[in-house]
Amino acid sequence: MPTLPRSLQTLTPLQAALGVLAIAFATIAGAWIFEWAGYLPCELCLMQRWAYYAGVPLAALTALVAAYGPRWLAGAGLALLGLVFVGSMVFGVYHAGVEWGFWAGPSGCTGALTRADSMQDFMKQLETAKVVRCDAVAIRILGLSLAGWNAMISATMATLALLGARKALA
């Protein structure tokens, strides 16, 4: 079995919780900055943020427990954080797959645009149209869309949290 790098072997539950907190906060802040800069999120992008809205306060609470509370509770918090970000990683992979055309996304924000038969139909379409498409990449950074980056970052946080949980519960 491969061994962990020395820095991860000495990882404490508090360091794991603080690491997840810092990465999650920076990631959601980055998403807000991209939105402010004009890269509007699609429906799936907004749904991917749920893990961060839950993860940031949970990581802060887990860090407090890791510093002052029982180890088993810190371990439980880290395990829960690990599960939250495994789910976020899976969702990021799903969204990236939609963007690459590997599978279909939700019908409300993907697929071919249909031509309206009349002006009245067109006006009705405008009322229910999603402006930002889930299958169109707004920006790629080093070849990955923001959904792809979410998958990578979430996998990193999940690993960090689960390593911390293992240490706390050992």
Image (tube, rainbow, N blue to C red):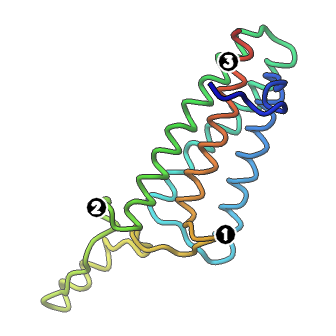
Element class at badge 1: helix
Q: Residue at x 26, y 84 (%)?
A: 123
Residue placed under numbered mark 2 in the picture: 104
The residues tagged by marks 2 and 1 sit, at their Cα atoms, a distance apart of 25 Å
Say which quarter of the image contains residue 77: top right
Q: Nearer the viewer, mark 2 or mark 3?
A: 3
Label ID, residue 34: 1
The dot on residue 12 is none
User: Residue 31 at x, y = what percent?
Assistant: 65, 61
Q: Nearer the viewer, mark 2 or mark 1?
A: 2
Residue farthest along the left direction in this orientation:
117
Q: Which residue is mark 3?
A: 166
Indicate the amino acid at tag 1: Phe
Q: CA distance from mark 2 to mark 3?
A: 37 Å
- Tell me where residue 103 sits by quadrant: bottom left
Q: Nearer the viewer, residue 8 or 111?
A: 8
Secondary structure of the residue carrying numbered label 2: loop
90 relative position to 151: left or right: left
Marks 3 & 1, CB-CB < 8 Å contact: no
Name the amino acid type tagged 3: Arg
Residue 93 drawn above or below residue 30:
above
Image coords of residue 56 (percent x, y): 70, 39
Q: Nearer the viewer, residue 76 or 159?
A: 159
Mark 3 or mark 1, whichever is nearer to me? 3
Q: Secondary structure at mark 3?
A: helix
Mark 1: few, some, or many residues within 10 Å (few <14, many ≥20)?
Answer: some
Pick the quarter of the image with the C terminus: top right
